[in-house]
Image: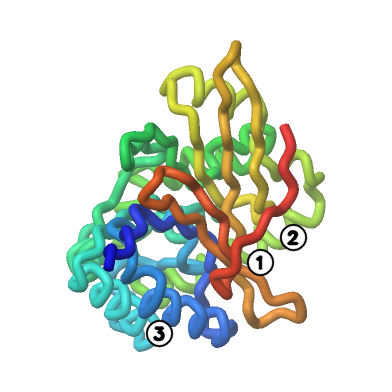
Amino acid sequence: MEAQPRTVALFISDLHLQEAMPRTLQAFLAFLRGPARQAQQLYVLGDLFEYWAGDDDMAAPFNTRIVQALRAVSDAGVALYWIAGNRDFLIGPAFAAATGAVLLPDPYVADIGGQSMILAHGDAQCTDDAGYMAFRSEVRQPAWQAAFLARSLAERKAIIASMRQGSREAQRSKSNQIMDVNGAAITALFDSTGAGVMIHGHTHRPALHVTHSSDIERRRYVLPDWDLDSEAPHGGWIVLDAKGVLHRLDHNAVEFEVSTGP
Ligand SMILES: [Mn+2]
């Protein structure tokens, strides 16, 4: 009997794991026990956590559980890669050591199974949102992060809670277009890397966008967010199979096709 070819890579993002969403956590843990073990590589492309106050918060039971589940996956021989999201960009070397994850820069051009792919969270390409881009460049500076992490954990959590409230209010007044990626920023990324595929999350607008530059096809896959606690449960991931084909699966591992457009 021929051995089943192993899945080359899996891509997920935007689970926004938090205590208030227990079904989403259960679905993610089931994913780590099941499909993730069948893959050679697992890429987490940002916002796995709803927020991350610093690696010293790994001691919280909720976080410990997730860290241990990720560790079990890397101990099973799956190479685990991580790109920070706008919610969990304070993940650092202690988290990487505890989980076995390799922290990657954003964007990152990966050569996976002979294909060149741009991997990103997606927030850095939302260049129409000037307010967010200014905030992002501030909080991604090592000096800002060092000063923030020097505060007590309780103080950091209080600041994050008020930031999340502010972000919810700001989102209500921003148009849909401002909160999506900018087409020129995406084109520039394809142009500068020469990659034919991009995978990102952040926008919570799962889709496959196909464009052309000269005769070359460019495919941009947008990952879904996960929410198994809402009235419209959703989630999912992308698979790169042994033949080099990308598939989109929902949280029940059922293949799905959603809006495909330019
Ligand atoms: Mn995000």
Query: Which mark lies nearer to you, 3 or 2?
Result: 3
Residue annotated with mark 1: 165
State the image quarter where residue 91 is shown: bottom left
Q: Is residue 113 above or below residue 145?
A: above
Colour scheme used in the picture? rainbow
SS for dot 3: helix
Q: Is residue 190 above or below residue 152?
A: above
Q: Residues within 10 Å of mark 3 (few under 14, many from 20)?
A: some
Q: Name the image quarter holding the C terminus.
A: top right
SS for dot 2: helix
| Amino acid at pointer 1 | Gln
Residue annotated with mark 2: 169
Residue depicted at 31% across the width and 46% down the height: 104
Q: Name the image quarter holding the N terminus.
A: bottom left
Mark 1 vs 3: CB contact within 8 A: no
| Amino acid at pointer 3 | Phe
SS for dot 1: helix
Residue annotated with mark 3: 62
Q: Residues within 10 Å of mark 1 (few under 14, many from 20)?
A: few
Tell me which numbered mark, 1 or 3, is placed earlier along the sequence.
3
Q: Using residue 169 as the reference point, say whether residue 112 is left or right of it.
A: left
User: Can residue 121 be seen?
Assistant: yes
Q: Residues within 10 Å of mark 2 (few under 14, many from 20)?
A: few
Mark 2 vs 1: CB contact within 8 A: yes
State the image quarter where residue 22 is shown: bottom right
Q: Nearer the viewer, residue 15 or 143?
A: 15
| Amino acid at pointer 2 | Glu
